[in-house]
Image: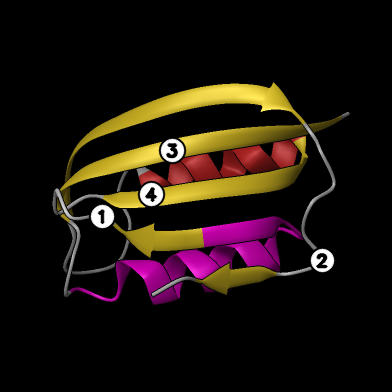
Amino acid sequence: MFKKIHLLISGNVQGVFYRANTKKKAEEFGLTGWVKNTLDNEVEILAEGEEENLKRLIKWCCNGSENAVVEGIKIKWGDCENKFDKFEIIV
């Protein structure tokens, strides 16, 4: 079943290649959507795809890239809207 997730990742997640590695993982898992930094020093992710692959992305996000220190993750599930054709980094 296709679903959508919206994630907010807090901790030391900016300046440690978290977005770039999230993009690689999302593409590896066949997901579409985007990742961006927020003004609150968090990373925000909106992803769509197979529910199992979204769960795989969430699991990866709990640790993130090598130098990241994830302190919290907020997860909101929704219905897939098929809005995206790829996964990209938004600046």
Q: Earlier in the sequence, mark 4 or mark 2?
A: 4
Quarter where residue 32 is shown: bottom right
Q: Which residue is mark 3?
A: 7
Q: Position of residue 29 (x, y in %)?
A: 70, 58
Tell me the element at label 3: strand
Q: Please say if the residues under marks 1 and 3 sit with CB atoms less than 8 Å apart.
A: no
Compute the Cα span from label 1 to label 3.
12 Å
Q: Which residue is mark 2?
A: 85
Q: Amino acid at mark 1?
A: Thr
Q: Which residue is mark 4?
A: 44
Q: Amino acid at mark 4?
A: Glu
Count of numbered tags? 4
Q: Which residue is mark 1?
A: 38
Q: Is residue 49 left or right of residue 35?
A: right
Q: Please say if the residues under marks 1 and 4 sit with CB atoms less than 8 Å apart.
A: yes
Please tell me which residue is depicted at 39% across the width and 62% down the height of the picture. Answer: 36
Q: Residue 32: within the magenta?
A: yes
Tell me the element at label 1: loop
Q: Is residue 29 left or right of residue 82?
A: left
Please tell me which residue is depicted at 38% across the width and 75% down the height of the picture. Answer: 91
Q: Which mark is residue 91?
A: none
Compute the Cα span from label 3 to label 2.
19 Å
Mark 1 is surrounded, within 10 Å at the Cα level, by few (under 14), some (14 to 19) or many (20 or more) other residues, namely some
Please tell me which residue is depicted at 33% across the width and 56% down the height of the picture. Answer: 64
Q: Earlier in the sequence, mark 1 or mark 3?
A: 3
Q: What residue range appears in magenta?
A: 16-34
